[in-house]
Image (cartoon, rainbow, N blue to C red):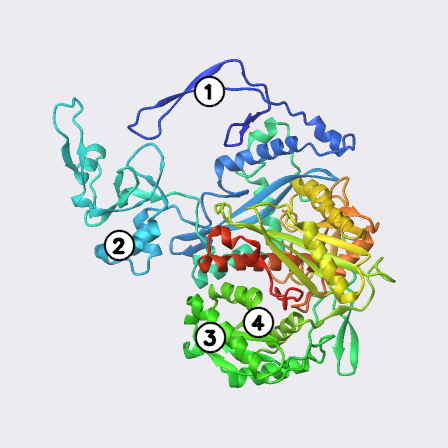
Amino acid sequence: MTAYDGKKNIFSAVELPTESSFKVEVSKSEGTMARSYIITLKLVNELRLSKLSDYLSGSIPSIPRDILQGMDLVMKENPTRNMISVGRNFYPTEHDTRDDLGRGIAAFRGFQHSLKPTCQGLALCLDYSVLAFRKRMPVIDFLYEHIRGFDINDFLKFRREVEKVLRGLKVYVTHRRIKQKYTISGLTKDITRDCEFDVQDPDGRKPPEKIRLVDYFRDRYNKDIEYKGIPCLDLGKKRYVPMELCELAEGQRYQKEHLDRNAAIMLKNISLPSPRDRANMICNMVRSEIGPCGSDTTRNFGFEVNMNMTSVTGRIIKPPELKLGSRNGEMTITVDNEKCQWNLVGKSVVEGKPIRRWAIVDFSSNSDPRFKLYPAQFVPKFINRCKSLGIEMEEPLFYKPTSMNNFSNLNSLRKLLESTYEQACKMKNGDLQVLLFVMSEEHRGYNYLKWISETKIGVMTQCCLSSPANKANDQYLANLGIKINAKLGGSNVELSESLPLLEGAGHTMFLGADVNHPGSRTPTIPSIAAVVGSMKWPAANRYAARIGPQDNRCEKILHFGDMCWELVETYEQQNKVKPEKIIVFRDGVSEGQFDMVLNEELQDLKRVFRTRGGYCPSITLIVAQKRHQTRLFPRSRQDGSSTGNVSPGTVVDTTIVDPFGYDFYLCSHHGGLGTSKPTHYRVLWDDHKFTSDQLQKLIYDRCFTMARCTKPVSLVPPVYYADLAAYRGRLYHEAAMMEGQSPTAAASMGVFKLHPRLENEMFFI
């Protein structure tokens, strides 16, 4: 009849006794004295569900969030009791045997869910989720599975690796009746047969007596220890337990970055079921006994959940006509409705920037022959491919071979970058346009390379791996070419038609904003804010970025108005006019933060614009959300794409949207793998009075203008670019920390100050 939040709040469907107190005795472990606690219940609030009904009927203006939170907790009560909880996600305690990833690791199929007010009433939004966990199993069995070649009879050989693998993991002991978790702090110095400890005389008359650990377990628990020649587990506070009496506890995540290649591929495949399979799994989870609807708790609160998926009516927006280049000038193309992709065979970019001053630094030259670049093959193929794209490219000024070891020595890497830039500038008049770096593998030194190049030296860079470069696949070379072209100020693709409601005189600027947060356990590391703005009209496909640090996990962009004003000034410098209309896309905020965006960030932007020259453009503010649990499935195979997903351009703006807001779900991309996830767009402010059709068409069309690919993307480009720019800022901070700067110095504005030569270019794509 109750739901508990795990802290101090209990939600009850009936009135609980709040006048009296009662005593509870709790024993932490077997053999320890129980402690008594006095429990008192205090009524702090009474939540009336009628307020939610009043909101849904339009009688009250604001969402009763306290009621939603209480109902959400009730829906989470059953999974919390019966499943593994990781953040907002839930996973079963046992895995499907088909999902064993090897080495003691398995994929667990779970879900995440939330409650959301919609036009149809309160909706349960549930989606499928997968994580890798260590399996619950005896510790020794885990060692045999996890450590290649492990042999308990040759333990000394593996001791260091065993300690590394086990330290910090949680285990249960099997010799006691009470189930309690312990954390492994290490291994005992001595092997089990040599472990001893002192036993105090209960009367205190005799001195402590030493007893062998193996004798203690035999006499006290009737356990004959088999593996006496290996260390015990040190469980802290002088608790030494033989390994064979310990088993790994359930629910211990295994980072996917540490999986071997085959396991990583298997986990990815499990994470990306077909739309039909995903829909079936979602329905099964809703109906599961351990799921949100599987206990009496929800029924006791009077909640009833329709177990069938909601049927909605959507429509498909027609893809736009695109402008590309050709031998005879510009050409207009129409993409197919299935994938909405286009290729560049026999076509070229709209505006190719001539590349006359560039050079190659090859970090792979000393690598294994399988992973080193063969420049005599790569360079001419790359130059020819760029020329076929309408990007005139001359021979590189030079080719500099070096070693991947330079990535590990930051001082050497910095000197290499500086000397390379100076060498190039001396060879030909004018600054170096771009440096192409070839690596044999991904490396953390990439962060430092980008930071030094973009903030200290001021040279555009493009990195690539030697293996795909050697294969010289036509599409790969084209992708490399269009990225460099966009970075240098070229235009790869443009819309052929004018944008709805934005045609005619007057310029329009698109802004995108996002904040990149560090992990939850890193309180001293700053969050990174980024704002990008379009610099060209009417193409609106070239952007500049501004990046800055702010307080840890602060979602509000503290200098939003100033960052936007810098971009407006840059726009005016390049176009001789300020934009009359501004459309802002904000990423990464939850519904509870909409008021902050509207009443603080937007007001800051307007205040800065107004106080600096009386600038008052018309503004539309839209939030783009990808972190939601809503998925769209075609009713039948005929209604979707060949992969079983909804078609690109599918939009839904009824039934499952906010009952009083201006929002819609748009699936703008082709889902080739797994199940497509639509982006949820929510309009918070609209001076332009867009109709739903106009705004949906505008956003969908913009998704075709992403500079680094030849297909529509899932997220409107201003947001996509802001996300990339904020992530680039994260790399800058990590690079400054790698250099040895203090946390305070690494979070200063100077770390993120772009070099003047690059601050208005698309270095971040």
**Which marked residue is nearer to the observer: mark 2 or mark 3?**
3
Judging by the rendered image, the residue that carries numbered circle 2 is 159
Residue 39, numbered label: 1
Judging by the rendered image, the residue that carries numbered circle 3 is 363
Q: Residue furthest top?
A: 19
Q: CA distance from mark 2 to mark 1?
A: 47 Å
Residue 462, numbered label: 4
| x, y percent for residue 121 | 72, 37
Q: CA distance from mark 4 to mark 1?
A: 63 Å
Q: Secondary structure at mark 2?
A: helix
Q: Earlier in the sequence, mark 2 or mark 3?
A: 2
Tell me what residue is drawn at x 31 percent, y 43 percent: 246
What is the crowding at mark 2: few (fewer than 14 residues within 10 Å), some, or many (at least 20)? some
Q: Is residue 204 above or below residue 353?
A: above
Q: CA distance from mark 2 to mark 3?
A: 36 Å
Amino acid identity at mark 3:
Phe
Q: Earlier in the sequence, mark 2 or mark 4?
A: 2
Q: Secondary structure at mark 4?
A: strand
Q: CA distance from mark 3 to mark 4?
A: 13 Å
Q: Do the residues bearing badges 1 and 3 touch, measured as CB atoms within 8 Å?
A: no
Q: Secondary structure at mark 1?
A: strand
| x, y percent for residue 550 | 58, 49
- Nearest the viewer among 640 and 412 is 412
Residue 664 visible here: no
Q: Is residue 292 left or right of residue 649?
A: left
Q: Secondary structure at mark 3?
A: loop
* Residue 287 placement: quadrant: top right
